[in-house]
Image (cartoon, grey):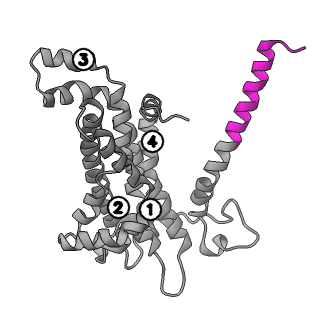
Amino acid sequence: MLSYIAKQKILRRVLYFFLVVSGLIYIFPFIWMVLSSFKYLEDVLAVPIHFFPPKWYWGVYYSAFNFPGYNFVRYFVNSSIVLVFAVLLCVALSTTSGYGFSKYKFRLNNVLFVMILSTMMIPFQAIIVPLFILVKKMGMQNSYQGMIVPESLTAFGVFLMRQFFYSVPNDYIESARIDGANEYRIFWMISLPMARTAVLALVIFHGQWVWNLLIWPLVLVSSPELRTLPQAIAQFTGVYFTPYPEQLAISVVACLPLLILFIFLSKHFVQGIATTGLKG
């Protein structure tokens, strides 16, 4: 009979094996995309498929960023502007809303929260037409504001911050009130610093959503100068052919900001998920 320690070692090794296999399955498309971005067009379309490039196309990234009719540096800047302002607005609105729902008892508190939460069940495609009409009447069509404002608040962000602020002890808040601090100072100086991990988790969640958003910019933006990176990649085709190596190269570049963001904030991301009660 195996001892308890031996069984735990075997179980741990089996678990690590499945984790490694799962990780390889998820990372394989990205590795394939990176390697294929260094292939020539005929090698990308070759049958049988070559995993490694038979001939390395080292100038593909220079060619992609200088492709006629496309200004990917400008598209990268556009996506960055939308990302920064949409995430900042989302953090500001979600933290204040979540704090209000968790720490203030007012009439119809739960009803309003359920109404906000129920919007998560509505697909974005179902509201895109009335949203476009609303944005157009507000004069924000074909503008940065039109891309930023509709993406500045999510029901998930309100839910995430509400769940975290529930874990903040009320004793801290009551002590600050006794000391004469007003509600704004309590939120800014006490509650918000304690919610740093949840805020960083929200930054990652909402950042990847805004950065990868395709349908809304396609509907809203008609000016080539205001294209976002996903929109430009979707429309990145030649007259008689699609430049797949250049398209893959731009896709690799588009993945880098979120990858870097997650690498630097991954520790806080895990802590934020654990402390908000969203872990499975």
* Callout 3 crowding tier (Cα within 10 Å): few <14, some 14–19, many ≥20: few
Residue 51, x across and y down, in percent: 70, 60
Inter-mark Cα distance, 1 to 4: 26 Å
Task: Residue type at mark 4: give it.
Answer: Phe
Crowd rating for badge 2 (residues with CA inside 10 Å; few <14, some 14–19, many 20+): some
Taking depth in this image into account, of 91 and 124 the one nearest to the observer is: 124
- Helix, strand or loop at mark 1: loop
Above or below, 279 against 9 in this view is below
Amino acid type, residue under disc 3 in the picture = Tyr
SS for callout 2? helix
Determine which of the numbered discs, if any, sits on residue 76 in the image. Answer: 2
Whole-number angstrom distance, CA of label 3 to CA of label 2: 43 Å
Residue that badge 1 annotates: 123
Mark 3 residue element: helix
Q: Relative to the observer, which residue lies in front, 59 or 198?
A: 198
Q: CA distance from mark 4 to mark 2?
A: 18 Å
Q: Are marks 4 and 2 in contact (CB under 8 Å)?
A: no
**Mark with earlier residue (4, 2):** 2
Extent of the magenta region: 1-21
140 is within the stretch colored magenta: no
Dot 4: what SS? helix
Q: Amino acid at mark 1?
A: Pro
The residue where tag 3 is placed is 172
Q: Earlier in the sequence, mark 3 or mark 4?
A: 3
**Quadrant of residue 193 in the image?**
top left
